[in-house]
Image: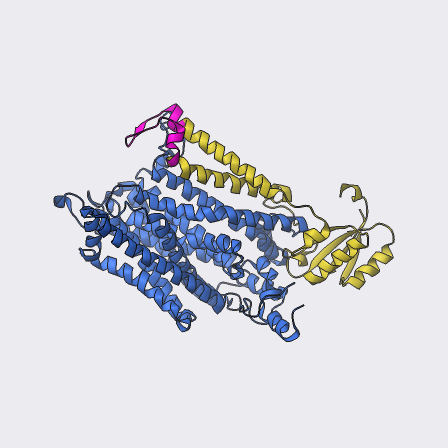
Chain colours: A blue, B yellow
Amino acid sequence: MHYESQVRNPLILGEKSYSDITNDIAKPVESKAPRAWWIAFSIAFVMFLWGVGNILYTIGTGIGVWGLNKTVDWAWDITNFVWWVGIGHAGTLISAVLLLFRQKWRMAINRSAEAMTIFSVIQAGLFPLIHMGRIWMAYWVMPIPNQFGSLWVNFNSPLLWDVFAISTYLTVSTVFWYVGLIPDFAMIRDRAINPVQKHIYKLLSFGWGGKAKHWQRFEEVSLVLAGLATPLVLSVHTIVSFDFATSVIPGWHTTIFPPYFVAGAIFSGFAMVQTLLLIVRKIFKLEDYINIEHIEMMNIVIMVTGSIVGVAYITELFIAWYSGVEYEQYAFLNRATGPYWWAYWSMMTCNVFSPQFMWFKKLRTNLVFTFVISIVVNIGMWFERFVIIVTSIHRDYLPSSWSMFSPTFVDIGIYIGTIGFFFVLFLLYARTFPVIAQAELKTILKSSGESYKKHHSEHGAH
Amino acid sequence: MGHTKHNPIVRALFNDDDIVLSAVKDLRSNGYEVSEVYSPFPIHGLDEAMGLKRTRLSLAAFFYGLTGLFFAAWLTYFTMISDWPQNIGGKPNATWFLNMPAFIPVVFELTVFFAAHLMCWSYFAVNGLYPGAKAQNPDPRTTDDHFLMEVQLEGDEEALNAKLQELGALEISKIEA
């Protein structure tokens, strides 16, 4: 019954028992933080504080402190928003879509990928909130009568759809993550020696005891949540792309946007998962669980989605030409050859050209190369959003109002601050949460564990 | 299982999921009632072997989703069509049906929101899970690599103990009801 084809590579390396999995995954939580963790945390925390200062300055003074002008009235804020939301797509993709496709390699990475999702959607959510200017009026986006009179929010507006999409995505991802975390918190609770630690994990584990009926419900709830989260994750970036696609700005008004944005989101999200997990597996010595097989699989996803994004870029150019609309044609000509040509070609190089290296097995199984590409991809995806947003509006219909955008220190500070905030959250998570879904992983030990597979091949399946 | 509450329980500890699963099948075919198994991970086929019914949480999720769908339809109808209709972007809000395409994103999101959250609350409620609840597993080793089975004791205790031993139990203990 625990048989898997020998063609598939083992997912858990070495001679492992159930107890070894428990020990290896509880270890980072139970031991003292390594020095590298403290260094990384300090840097991230300083970046975070710098961001808080810049956000407070923005709120106190107004968004005039940003580099926006009358022509370019949307720039880094929305670029960063879309960038973070995009990164936030890989977690749900890994845990939900790969669950539906019964991809067992997801089990070693889904916990951290979901954590990354939640933390990056939090960063994304900050930008529209700050951009409101008067953040204390943020409740106006809720469907309550304006000024508590009778004027309501506008349900025709894609910006309002975003409110519903992002908040549904954030909260549903969080409960999905938490339902899976409960049995693992219980594992840490049951072996904790320190009474404070035991009490904290008792609170977090909700009293989980692993009863047969509860596991049955657990599996059903996971499956249904995956079924709900799959269309949800696709809808979220679709709706984010509607922010642009439903406008009438040349370069934004494009029906290809939803699938193009979703592919880009998966692309950047997997790159970020790759960046984070390559570090996590090394520092916490989890190489047996997150091994070269997992990294290769993710590189293949990066290669495929990067190529889809490339096709989308070329389709956009073709359709602009084919439409015969001169404004549409100029928008794209300006992107590739105008004053922002360097941003366009950085995007092209990072997103379309660099993932093509992954066709070579030698390169996609090389850790250092993978790490470099994963960062290059995220730089490229930031440029993609910058190119779409700024180059489409910096030269509008009236040449006398054409202008360029240059960020102020506040624009840069808030962006750095969100990177810091993200890493503060992720580093705290990595020290206190079980970073691998150990309960789920134990279910595949006998079918995908290296020693068990070897045993099967020597003694035949039984 | 309410009628057997007053029976004493025999607890048997195992260290392998396959052994537990075949032990459950064996005991049930010999007329014993296995009332609980605590395990560190879901064991495929255990619910069937124990004779557990299918959970209805997915059915509940469907109805929760329907609730969200109708709520969203009502919300968009009430706010955009009935309470304060406006002409936005040259598109008069005449009927809900004609404006419906613009409401689909919100209707979809609220459907998912209701289905997912209410299902999770139901899951916590029926499992008795809440922050700070007492650990439900009597033996802390069952979240690591051990499996604890509870069998209702009816009749000969010696025979059951011998049977459990034969099936591979590592430790056997009796709990008076």
Residue A194 position, x and y percent, is 60, 57
In the image, is A208 to the left or to the right of A343?
right
Q: Residue at x 60, y 51 (%)?
A: A219
- Looking at the rendered image, the quarter that the N terminus of chain B falls into is top right
Q: Count of labels shown? A: 0
Q: Residue at x 41, y 39 (%)?
A: B105
Q: Quadrant of residue A272?
A: bottom left
- Residue furthest out toward the left: A400
Residue A184 position, x and y percent, is 58, 55
- Residue furthest out toward the bottom: A458
Tell me, yes or no, whether the highlighted magenta stretch contains residue B94. Answer: yes
Tell me, yes or no, whether the highlighted magenta stretch contains residue A115. Answer: no
Residue A318 position, x and y percent, is 26, 54
Q: Residue at x 67, y 68 (%)?
A: A462
Residue A40 position, x and y percent, is 40, 62
The residue nearer to you, when weighing A2 against B7, is A2
In the image, is A442 to the left or to the right of A227?
right
Query: Which segment did they paint magenta?
Result: B79-101
**Residue A137 in view (yes/no):** yes
The residue nearer to you, when weighing B65 against B157, is B65
The residue nearer to you, when weighing A116 against A136, is A116
**Residue B12 in view (yes/no):** no
A10 over B62 or under it: above or below: below
A381 over A142 or under it: above or below: below
